[in-house]
Amino acid sequence: MSDVIFQAENIVKHFGGVHAVEDVSLSVIAGSIQAIIGPNGAGKSTLFNALSGFYKCDSGKVTFKGVDITTAPIHRRIAMGMGRTFQTSSIFPNLSVYDNLLIGLQSAANLAFRFRPVDATQHKTIEEKAERLLDFVNLKASAHRPVAELAHGSQRLCEIAMSLSTDPVLVMLDEPMAGLAHAETTRVVEVIRKLHSELGLTVLFVEHNMRVVLSLAQRIMVLDRGRVLAEGTPAEISANEAVRDAYIGKEVIESV
Amino acid sequence: MRMSNRAGLIAALVLLVLLILTPQIAPLLHLAISVCTEVLLFAIAAMAVNLLIGYTGVLPFGNAAFFGLGAYGAGLTIQFWHVKFFSSIGLGVLAALIGAFLIGPFLLRRRGIYFSLLFIAFGQVFYFLAYRFTDITGGEDGMNFARPVIEGTSFSPPDGSFYYMMLGFFVLIGILFWLLVRSPFGRSLIAIKENETRARYLGLDTDRFIFVALLISAAIEGLAGACYGLSIMFADPLQLDWHQSGNFVLMTILGGSGTIFGPFIGSLIFVIGSDILSSAIPWWQIPLGALFVVCVLGFPKGILGTILDALEKRRGGFGYEARDTLHGTVASEREIQP
Amino acid sequence: MAHVAPEIFNGLILGAFFAVVAIGLSLIMNLTGTINLAHGSFMTLAGYLAFAMVSAGTNWWFALAAAPILTVIVGVAVERTLIRPLYRRDPVYSLLLTFGLSLIAEEVYRLIWGTNGVPFSPPPSLQGSVSLGFTDFPAFRLFIAGALLVIIVALVVFLQRTRLGLRLRAAVQDSEMIAALGTNTQLLYMLNFGLGILIAGVAGVLAAGLLGLNPQSGNALLMPAFVTVIVGGMGSLLGAVAGGLLIGVAISVTTLFLPAFSEIVMYILMAVILLIRPRGLFGEEGIFG
């Protein structure tokens, strides 16, 4: 069962003269959790943004479920089953948690463009789904509070729930632990684990926190200065000399 | 949330009664009925601006182009094709929609201040067209035309009846607006206003939503403009100018963007205020400009926004409309569902 | 052809005005997100101040230097007190504020200097004409062409060669990063606004002598300057220059052959260029911006 669900071939992305991502290829196997790591400025976020359609790739090819999506607009990617989060939680700050979820749910149910109110059955389906998502990320108690009022960790969980609201098969998380306190990290790690174990989703994430990466990821890709430095299982990556030199040794000592 | 809806409904009914009685009250206040009509029509125009500023999060500083297209659309078709009352209004709306169709695709490429800059520039095209093609439009002097008769009758409504017809339009647009911002489409717009990137990553083709919002806004603006043309029986390039856009944006912000009644309050203050000032002092543009400055620095949330915020703090849960609408909607929708 | 050449030259001068105003607008817009609708009012102010000085008996050349400086003082005071509180807020507020200021300014000019405008002729040394070989050309126009060229070159050198200029450009790219590096952003904003007003002021005095001086004369250059920014590519210095000259020449030549289209032509040009190059002539590709 090594079906590749998402594949990137020879991705290049420049900014001005700076080579942010230089010829990176990547395959994500359906149902796996994979991580992209690398020191600051390695091009992780740029790669992530290029893969999710936030940036246009200068060259290269991205395929998702066998379809070429290199130039597909974002809403097409979402309709195909991609979901993502951002380094700084991207939410609707003045809306309640419930309403944040509602936007994605009505979009997924093809109701977003509707001018009349939704009918009772559709409404019930949406409400039930919202309840399930709130349960999943454990935010039921704050469902009707504006997200801006919540703690960072809860905002991040809300964002993850939002990215689930469009029924994705592949969830891309951009540094899910960024800016979180230690206790919050544990909550978010648990939810990410559940994405994989309970919902059976494919997860691709960029992360700085090595402990999180080593405990969650099945496969890891290491980027350095826009290029792939190494790829392998957590064990292989922690044993890799080049990776240690470039990155891990220092970081592990810092973060542990 | 029910509280909020009920309070809003009561306020709307009180306002409606006052507006129905206005032709009786206005003379006591030495207000011409045409000024009261102007309040209603500018309130409709400001609602169109509000849809974009308050609910979609784009800044339309060239919206008067659609207002003026409405006025010229009505005026030119009356003059050259001798169309009747409602047809001329319909054609005014059509002219505004065509304008929006033409410039919309250019505006949609950018966001933020660049969107506004493009809107100002493209809106000005229509100003210069009206200004230059003197043979047709009368150029700088504008064009006079008579208020036509209503279809199937020989009745051309005088100012008194005209006021009530405009009140009818105002109520109709108000109700449609209320329904629109509470519809799933309206929620999607609010989501785009809150965070467009996130809205995209929830599968919304945001360009399409903003384009449709722009078309709706242009149609409302065109309606207001066409009726305004019929009201004063005159169209001139200044109705298309970006200064007029600025006035509509001010009314929206002054009253409270993202609220249903805000644009009306803004229009009321603006129209009555400039009516009184311009007849009292020759340099009335100074206090008008000062109103802009005071509004921006003193009441950034607008009059209604500031009041609603204060009430919300005191009572808890009185929704500042753009803020908590979505949840409020779910509750109220449930009430009206079978 | 003989009568087209001077029109092209006049178009270049007009275009250089557009370019200079557009650069000032761009500087302010890119750094602080403010579309300064009062920009034209500052130009008019500089024109009237110079007119008042010359009327009071000072030398024209002194007025050319002093009026823009006084205008900058007014501009910086406005920026400090009124615009600064709006930097972190929605752009609608600074738009409305600068729009209100332009309304006030226009009325003030009208009260002081009258509705109809005032005659403001160039100094005697610049009156008369110069032979260019194929045609005689007014000396004042040649001087203006030279002066605008100097302003543009000086700006390019300042923004690309000096430390402060580089800092301004870096701040445009990423104001948060500059703040993190410890540059005083508020001071930078003020200097940037002052610089924008300074070139508007100089252009205002020059334009007053060439294009006339009335309460709305500066505003007449505002819309072409907006179109210049769009055509050139928002945020591009080179684009503002190229766009301004292109529009100026287009307007002049159209005025000669099809006077009715003289204003429309710049919008047609804008639409065509945006269709071919959605980001303008020299605009960089962005994501959503």
Image (cartoon, coloured by chain):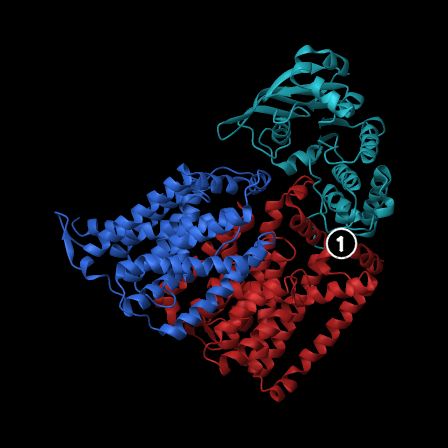
Chain colours: A cyan, B red, C blue
Residue closer to the observer: C6 or C40: C40
Residue B95 coordinates in the image, percent (x, y): 50, 61
Q: Tag 1's secondary structure?
A: helix
Image-quadrant location for residue A215: top right
Residue picked out by circle 1: B326
Q: Is residue C263 visible?
A: no
Question: In the picture shown, does residue B151 fall above or below C190?
Answer: below
Q: Give how far across and how far down residue B337 sits, in percent.
A: 83, 58
Q: Nearer the viewer, residue C55 or B181?
A: C55
Give the quarter of the image for residue B291.
bottom right
Judge whether A241 appears above or below B208 on screen: above
Q: Position of residue C164 (x, y in %)?
A: 45, 41
Q: Quadrant of residue A39?
A: top right
Residue appearing at x 62%, y 65% in the figure:
B298
Q: Chain of mark 1?
A: B
Q: How many labels were placed on the picture?
A: 1
Point out the image quarter for the N terminus of chain A: top right
Residue for point 68% across, 52% down:
B190
Which amino acid, mark 1? Answer: Leu
The percent position of residue A192, horizontal first and vertical second, equals 80, 30
The residue closer to the viewer here, C166 or A4, is: C166
Given the current orientation, which residue lies at the most extreme bottom position?
A: B28
User: Can residue C86 be seen in this snapshot?
Assistant: yes
Image position of B272 (left or right of B306):
left
Vertical order, B223 against B17 (above or below): above
- From the viewer's perspective, tell me whether residue A71 is left or right of residue A153: left
- Which quadrant of the rendered structure holds the C terminus of chain A? top right
Residue A217, compared with residue B324, is above or below; it is above
Are there few (<14), some (14-19), or many (20+) residues within 10 Å of tag 1?
many
